[in-house]
Amino acid sequence: GDEEDDIFFDPEGEVVEQKVTHEHSEALNQRIKEHLALLDHSDPDANGWEQITEDGEMKVYRKELVQDGLICDPLKAVHSVGLVTAKEMCHYFWFPDVRRDWEETVDVFDVLETLDEATTINYQTHKQVWPAAQRDCLYLSSMVKVDNPPSVGDKIPHDTWIVCNFSVDHPEANPVSGCVRALIEVALICQTFITLPKDGGPITRDCLQCDIIYVANVNPGGWAPASVLRSIYKREYPKFLNRFTNYVQQKTKDLKLLF
Ligand code: 16C
């Protein structure tokens, strides 16, 4: 059985049962519910999403959003990669010990607290981008299995996992001086699709396709020049998605499938 918290949806997509295990459980469940609405991406251009770049199966969208003079453009990317499961993808995205293997934009990385076996509170600083001040963020990160996700047409996923990262406060935060606190709402939603072998043989990595939705709402927390910020967005998110998905494919290629 899965040790992670399960979230249960009724056919209308309402949460009908959820475990509360820590002080942020309710906030977490609420965000998961909101993020999962994105699974209905049958029309990605709906609701004002503007495509900013494309690379093979990867498509990256944004909405222009300025709040209190700060650029907070929501970002959404959809991708689909072979050879890996949704749980593997989410595991490597969530698991603190491998963060530095794929996360290139981070300098300091600390786990401040472990709330349960799949939930931590992390503090990190990001590399400085001239001429803006350095950014840091303090966020809860949780990996959750989703049962009965909202359906996406006629494709039926084998399984659905989500990692949800969102800003929280923490008394033990020891902020690096000079950093401006960025506020984040990030989710990685992954679904495994399996094509059974025609010869009735065992399921191998070649049978796997993992569909990914990644969303990031980042409030930079203080001034940064618009042109710098929007060019970082356009460059860094596709770079992250390519690097991260290649990393997971490499890490898992000789391992047993993890569902
Ligand atoms: O989701 C990703 N990583 C997770 C684990 O680290 C976590 C992180 C979210 C990103 C939070 C960004 C906070 C401010 C970033 C400062 C700029 C760093 C750029 C350095 C470039 C050399 O959920 C993968 C995220 C990968 C993409 C990160 C790029 C974010 C750009 C946002 C720009 C906002 C402020 C820029 C101010 C100069």
Image (spheres, helix red, strand yellow):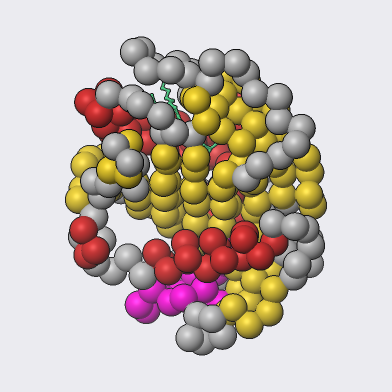
Residue at 44%, 33% (x, y): give it. Answer: 221
Q: Quadrant of ligand 1?
A: top left
Determine the image quadrant of residue 170: top right
State the image coordinates of residue 89 (x, y, percent, origin top left): 56, 47
- Over which residues does the magenta segment extend? 148-161
Between 127 and 193, the residue placed more toward the observer is: 127
- Residue farthest to the bottom? 11
- Residue farthest to the top? 130
In the image: residue 81, left or right of residue 169: left
Residue at 67%, 36% (x, y): give it. Answer: 122
In the image: residue 118, left or right of residue 183: right
Compared to residue 254, the image places residue 1 above or below, namely below
Q: Indicate yes or no whether the magenta region holds residue 82.
A: no
Confirm whether residue 16 shows in the render: yes
Residue at 21%, 42% (x, y): give it. Answer: 52
Name the quadrant of the C terminus. bottom right
Confirm whether residue 160 shows in the render: no
Q: Indicate yes or no whether the magenta region holds residue 152.
A: yes
Compared to residue 24, the image places residue 94 above or below, namely above
Compared to residue 257, the image places residue 233 above or below, namely above
Residue at 21%, 48% (x, y): give it. Answer: 51
State the image coordinates of residue 211 (x, y, percent, origin top left): 43, 57
Determine the image quadrant of residue 251: top right
